[in-house]
Amino acid sequence: MKNLIIIRHAKSSWDVPLNDFDRPLTKKGIQDAHSVSLKVNPILPNNYIIWSSKAKRAMETAMIFAQNFNFPIENIQFKTDLYTFDEYKLEQIISNCSDDIENLIVFGHNEAITNFVNKFGDRFIFNVTTAGFVWITFETNSWKNLSNGKTTKVIFPKEI
């Protein structure tokens, strides 16, 4: 069995004229990341790895979650290719995860996330919000064989 937790980066700022890749979190984004991470910490699987997009807002979100999970920040794997808005590219990246890993947490971007969870989960989600948490369980032993997962848990900041 494989457990995939996908988290959309928290709310980011458009106030400063920066390249999209370099946009930081807003105060609300920071608060939401803390709220969601503290809510989900007790339900996480025991052993997992964390991957994050290298975009500033995704990295900041991943670091807040890792801090609240007591997960060493230096163990987060920051991946340039996770800076994608394409669910097919996201699927390809996840499928390359080592089969030795049972539990994977990924921090990334929309539309890729919403489209991915709707393709593989069994619950339609209109939009995975910023700082949104979606856990999908797959009855497979290989990340390359993902299909027909079960949406185990969905948590959005507005629900907390």
Image (cartoon, helix red, strand yellow):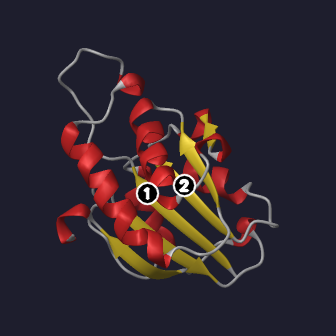
Report which quarter residue 26 is drawn in. Answer: top left
The answer for how far apart the CA atoms under marks 1 and 2 are is: 6 Å
Q: Nearer the viewer, residue 71 or 122?
A: 71
Q: Position of residue 15 (x, y in %)?
A: 17, 23
Residue 70 horizontal/vertical position (percent)? 54, 57
Is residue 90 something one can see in this rendering?
A: yes
The residue to which callout 2 is attached is 106
Q: Is residue 76 above or below residue 133?
A: above
- Badge 2 local density, few (<14 within 10 Å), some, or many (20+)? many
Pointer 1: what residue?
Answer: 7
Question: In the drawing, does residue 73 fall left or right of residue 154?
Answer: right
Instruction: Locate the C terminus and report the quarter of the image it occupies.
Output: bottom left
Q: Residue furthest top?
A: 17
> In the figure, is residue 148 to the left or right of 1?
left
Task: Look at the numbered disc 2 and give the secondary structure of its residue.
Answer: strand
Q: Is residue 92 above or below residue 135?
A: above
Contact between labelled residues 2 and 1, with CB atoms less than 8 Å apart = yes
Give residue 146's mark: none
Crowding around mark 1 (Cα neighbors within 10 Å: few <14, some 14 to 19, many 20+) is many
Q: Residue at x 52, y 73 (%)?
A: 44
The amino acid type found where label 1 is placed reads Ile
